[in-house]
Every structure is written in C-alpha cells, then in structure tokens.
C-alpha cells in the first residue's frame, strides 16, 4: 500500500533526525534555560511564576526538537525562532487558564495507535457559532493542549528508540459545507499558530470526502505548502481499515471499537488524572502575576532593536494590545532602521579604535601644516597638547 510505505519512509527519516540531533537539542535546552531565560526575565522583569511556566516549555524536549528541525538544526536560527515563540506564548497563553473541552476534537485512548505507534486524533469539521476572536483563542488553546498531551506520551514512552513524536489525524468532512467555511480563520491558523507548534501532525486522513468537497479542496490546497500536501491522504473505507485495522478504529469509521462518543478521551478535562487536574486548577486560581513595576507583561509598548526578545532583530517593534501580535514600530521593515542599528553596534564595538585613529590623524595634519609654515617653535609649543591627546586615545 502506497500510503503505508510513504508514512513508513517519513517515520524512519524523522527518527533518524531525532537520534542524530538529540544531543544538540539537549545542549540547546541548557543554553535556553541557563542563559536566555534569565536574560529575558531580567529584561522584562518577569515574576517567578511566569519564569517557571516558561521553563516548563523550554524543558519540553520534543517541542524544542520540532522547532530545531523546522530550522534545519541550525543553532542560531533555532535560538532566534525559540525566542520569538517564547514571546508569542507570553502574549497568547499566559496566564494559564483552566482546561477546556475542545468541541469536535477527540483523541483516541492512549493504547490505540496507528501501525507506527503514533496517537490518533479525530476532528469533525462543523460550523461554530462563535466570534472569530473567540475561535482564534480556542484554536491556540487546543494546540497547547495537544502539545502537553504529546509531551506526556513522549515522556511515558517505554521505547526510547521509537518514541511518540507526532499525531495522526482523521478529518471527518461529513458536515463541512461552503457556509461553514472560514478561509480567513484557516489562513490565520496556517500563518500564526501552526508555525508555533511545528511538526505535530504526521498525516491527515480525509474521511467522508465526496465530489461536493472537490471545489473546497481546490481552494484549500492552494493555501497549503507542498510539505503539508504530501501528508494528506484520501483513503477509501477499505484502505482506512487496512491501514489502521478494525481494532484501532471506532464504529463511526468502520472499526470495532465503541462509538467515538463512548470512548475515553485523554485530552478532555473530566478525564485528566486527579493530580494533573489539581495542578492546572491551582495555576488557574492564582491571581494574574504582575511584572514589576508594570502591571502586566503586555504593558511594555516597544522593544529595542537589540533586545534579546525582539523577534525582528535590528528593527524597533511594538506590542499594541494584550494579545495582539508584535508589529513593526513604523509599520514595515525600514532599511534606515537596520542601518542605524548596525551603525550603533559598529560604533559600540570599534569606538576606541576610531577615536585613537582620529586623534593620530589630527596630530599628523597639525604637524604637517606647522612644518610647512616653517615655524621652528611649533613642535615645542604643542608637545603638551600631543601628550594630552595620547592619554585621551589610550583611555
């Protein structure tokens, strides 16, 4: 089966990257936790609760691995991407809120996996009667819930050689219609959310796809990159059963498991472990920590071009709202801003050498002019001035 072979090839390539770069990921985490996080905390005056929360994410080896993989495992690019991601998380995911049930998103029980040991998600695409902003917040929290669950599976994995690194998703299109389609929300998710949670999905199986969805698919596939398109499959019922096996599918999709509504769902709040639920509730019940001396993190209106937390190094940026994205201070990347930053850094690095060179140049010009006029007393009259300038240059 072509689908099986392609997914096996992708899985083997991912595991090879994981094994080859795991030590580098650990070293990157050490740098982030021991050097970057303290610098960011000092600069933004983060409260201890926020620092602990940020450290929890930086300790997520799987998340750091996925971001590094997206950046070709180049250390400098990975550090920059993680710092941008940290700023985004502080503006969009803090303070921690109580866990919530995600409508129409189900995770099959932890013991149900695809042939390559990956957990399985089921998403039913339906219209949602909520404002666009509410849906955006909901999508962000849904991805964070999946990240935490995948980290838990990764840490609990008994096979260190083949841990759980990604999900496999079943996308049920039976209730999808043109009226329920929100292109703007879809493109926003692709642009703003998925890059913050890269590489979490290994494959997407489109279920209940019919000719009525062909027009919608022609629109969506133009928005997706080639890498994403290569992971999307349109299996028949027989192909789906052959890939997963009847014992790994609910009755809704031809398997022998109980219906989806009766299956245990490990990402639903009511099914969280007691200790885990109490920890989340305790975090949610705490008053929102403040940034000293400012009342909240978002009260910082701008970041300098050379700030460690600036996602666009070299350009001044603004954060204009509580959960709004970081934007350029002047609305765009201006070359003059970058030139000004580079000039400032150049001056900071070489100012002593430039000062000394200017002093020497001035002395030579003065001496040359004095000798041309034939003033024999000239050298003796400026000896004191030369000595003072040498001391100035040495300082």
Image: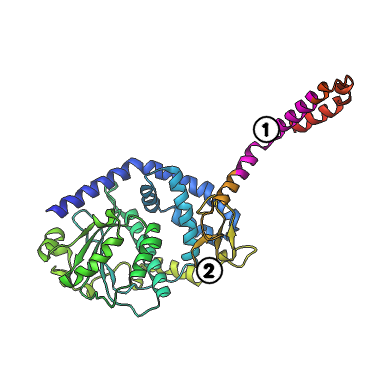
Report crowding for label 1: few under 14, some 14 to 19, many 20 or more residues within 10 A (C-alpha).
Answer: few
Which residues lie in the magenta part? 343-368
Q: Residue at x 24, y 69 (%)?
A: 216
Q: Is residue 344 magenta?
A: yes
Q: Nearer the viewer, residue 5 or 302?
A: 302
Q: What colour-coding does the image apply?
A: rainbow
Q: Quadrant of the C terminus?
A: top right
Determine which of the numbered discs, if any, sits on residue 353 in the image. 1
Residue assigned mark 2: 322
Q: Residue at x 36, y 71 (%)?
A: 269
**Helix, strand or loop for the magenta stretch, by majority:** helix
Q: Residue at x 54, y 53 (%)?
A: 334
Quadrant housing residue 173: bottom left
| Real-space Cα separation, disc 1 to disc 2, in angstroms | 45 Å
Asked which secondary structure carries label 1, the reply is helix
Asked which secondary structure carries label 2, the reply is loop
Asked whether the viewer can see residue 270, the reply is yes
């Amino acid at each position: 089966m072509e689908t099986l072979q392609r997914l096996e090839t992708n899985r083997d390539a991912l595991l090879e990257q994981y094994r080859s770069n795991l030590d580098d990921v650990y070293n990157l985490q050490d740098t982030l936790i021991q050097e970057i996080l303290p610098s960011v905390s000092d600069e933004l005056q983060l409260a201890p609760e926020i620092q602990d929360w940020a450290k929890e994410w930086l300790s997520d080896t799987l998340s750091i691995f996925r971001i590094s993989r997206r950046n070709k495992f180049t250390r400098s690019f990975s550090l920059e991407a993680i710092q941008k991601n940290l700023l985004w998380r502080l503006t969009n995911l803090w303070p921690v809120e109580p866990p919530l049930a995600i409508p129409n998103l189900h995770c099959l029980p932890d013991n149900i996996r695809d042939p390559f040991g990956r957990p399985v998600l089921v998403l039913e695409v339906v219209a949602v009667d909520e404002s666009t902003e509410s849906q955006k917040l909901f999508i962000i929290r849904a991805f964070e819930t999946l990240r935490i669950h995948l980290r838990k599976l990764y840490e609990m994995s008994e096979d260190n050689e083949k841990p759980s690194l990604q999900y496999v998703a079943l996308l049920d299109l039976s209730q999808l219609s043109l009226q329920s389609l929100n292109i703007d929300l879809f493109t926003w998710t692709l642009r703003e959310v998925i890059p913050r949670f890269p590489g979490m999905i290994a494959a997407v199986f489109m279920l209940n796809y019919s000719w009525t969805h062909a027009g919608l698919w022609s629109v969506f596939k133009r928005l997706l990159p080639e890498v994403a398109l290569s992971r999307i499959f349109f299996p028949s019922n027989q192909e789906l059963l052959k890939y997963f096996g009847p014992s790994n599918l609910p009755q809704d999709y031809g398997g022998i498991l109980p219906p989806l509504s009766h299956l245990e769902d490990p990402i639903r709040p009511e099914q969280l472990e007691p200790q885990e639920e109490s920890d989340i509730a305790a975090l949610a019940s705490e008053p929102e920590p403040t940034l000293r001396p400012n009342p909240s993190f978002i009260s910082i209106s701008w970041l300098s071009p050379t700030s460690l937390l600036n996602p666009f190094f070299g350009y001044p940026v603004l954060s204009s709202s509580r959960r709004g994205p970081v934007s350029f201070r002047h609305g765009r990347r201006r070359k003059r801003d970058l030139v000004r930053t580079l000039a400032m850094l150049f001056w900071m690095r070489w100012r002593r050498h430039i000062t000394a060179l200017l002093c020497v140049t001035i002395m030579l010009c003065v001496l040359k002019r004095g000798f041309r006029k034939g003033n024999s007393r000239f050298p003796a009259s400026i000896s004191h001035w030369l000595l003072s300038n040498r001391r100035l240059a040495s300082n």
